[in-house]
Amino acid sequence: MDLAEKLEILADSAKYDVACTSSGVDRPGQHGKIGSCAAPGICHAFTPDGRCVSLLKVLYSNSCSYDCSYCVNRRSNDIRRATFIPRELAELTIGFYRRNYIEGLFLSSAVMGNPDLTMERMIEALRILREEYRFHGYIHAKAIPGADPLLVRRLGLLADRMSVNIELPSEVSLQRLAPDKKKAAVLAPMRQIADESRQSRREMQVYRGAKPFAPAGQSTQMIIGASPETDRHIIGLTEALYKKYSLKRVFYSAYLPVVEDSRLPALTTRPPLLREHRLYQADWLLRYYHFSASELLSEEEPNFNPYLDPKCCWALRNPACFPVEVNTASKEELLRVPGIGPKSAQRIIKARRMQHLGLAELKRIGVVLKRAQYFITCNGYLGAHGTRAEIANALLDPKAFGVGVQQLSLDDCMPKALPDAAPELHQLTAEGMDVLQAAALLRQEAVTCITRQM
Ligand code: SF4
């Protein structure tokens, strides 16, 4: 098999991995070395389904000894297999870099025989790249659960970011769908990476020659929709992972059916993209808005509302926290107002040192007044009074009712529900209803439902 063919197979096998952003490293170019890492990260590409991927994203091998039911590379699946040799992969990466095709490498692998053997080969490829080719650019490498801690350490000294995929939100689902994987084997390298990363940061402050260990931290990925866990369970787990293992990111991957299996949703199931989006919004609230998982969902309400973003939902459930006086509120209080994000909260705090802020100033600052108007007071403005239906309408997330246009030919365009619109919209259109009519009907139903809860 020639190299181009291997690349085609191994890049295709890697496309289901979404944990590949490169934020977190700022390393300027150095004389005698190739490559650099700017803080905004390496170049990203967007796949047709909207995922953000780095350009050279490959598996070292897709020949897997494990049989995870949701994975296209599983042992029992009849697909073309390929494996790089370390020098081949290093030469390929540096060749692409020199031709300006890529700015970094995202390397993962199936389990070839056993985790140690797989990690040794990946480490050798990265060693050649770093030491022989003096490659100084961004590398994100996946640690293979179950590998020897010494190998995890060696990988961490070569990579900028590491990740260990948690795969599924609970141990029960892991046992059912990925019987070769164990929760403890996933969490052990996560703990090691967190500890070694912290220690290396400390050493680098003290010793000149100290080596960075995964300086861009670690991330993980879990599949959403292949198993029955609720959003409450997932977001609680996310919070625990951020706290315990100092993760930079938790990535959610809407389950995309690729194999027929009685333990999994049917092949015709749509990937739950809107649910994935709500989880990312909630994740954002945990990391930048000082929310806790227990504030976002409860036992009575274990899943996110498809029509409202999690912050609006929280605001509607907690009317006693509003209105917030913009000119005196703390940053934490401002961040809880729908329509005010971290940047506008920061700008408000800076601007109100000079003057009393009114609606015109807030608009200039970038506050989304369509949402915020019902939750704030400022400079004599006492908050908008709207009927419940008006407020619900202003807060609805347009994404849930998204309709796009599919161009069939030069003069034939057909409106179509967008892939991440609410599942109910897809269902109504599949039953034959006109998509615009279905979106209007669904919107009406969502407003009625939300006003009842207000
Ligand atoms: S270990 Fe499981 S998820 Fe990873 S490549 Fe093999 S079958 Fe796929």
Image (cartoon, rainbow, N blue to C red):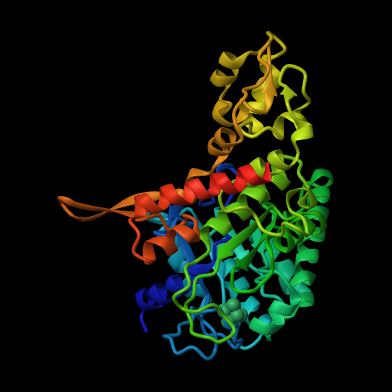
Residue 23 is left or right of residue 157, and the answer is left
- Residue 25 in sight here: no
Q: Nearer the viewer, residue 219 or 77?
A: 77
Q: Residue at x 62, y 48 (%)?
A: 281
Q: Quadrant of the N terminus?
A: bottom left
Q: Quadrant of the C terminus?
A: top right
Q: Residue furthest left?
A: 411
Q: How many numbered marks appear? A: 0
Q: Quadrant of residue 429?
A: bottom left
| Left or right of 443, for residue 189 | right
Residue occupying the far top of the picture: 355
Looking at the image, which residue is at 66% across and 44% down? 313
Residue 172 horizontal/vertical position (percent): 74, 79
The quarter holding residue 438 reads bottom left
Near-viewer residue (249 or 370):
370
Evaluate whether residue 407 shows in this view: yes
- What percent of the width, then of the height, locates residue 354? 69, 8
* 230 on left or right of 330: left
* Residue 331 x/y as whole percent: 75, 28
Residue 342 spot, x, y in % from top left: 66, 33
Residue nearer the viewer, 119 or 278: 278
What is the quadrant of residue 127 in the picture?
Answer: bottom right
Residue at coordinates 44% horizontally, 75% vertically from top-left? 268
Considering only vertical position in the picture, is 213 above or below 453?
Answer: below
Q: Residue at x 44, y 56 (%)?
A: 97
Q: Is residue 186 left or right of residue 388?
A: right
Q: Quadrant of ligand 1?
A: bottom right
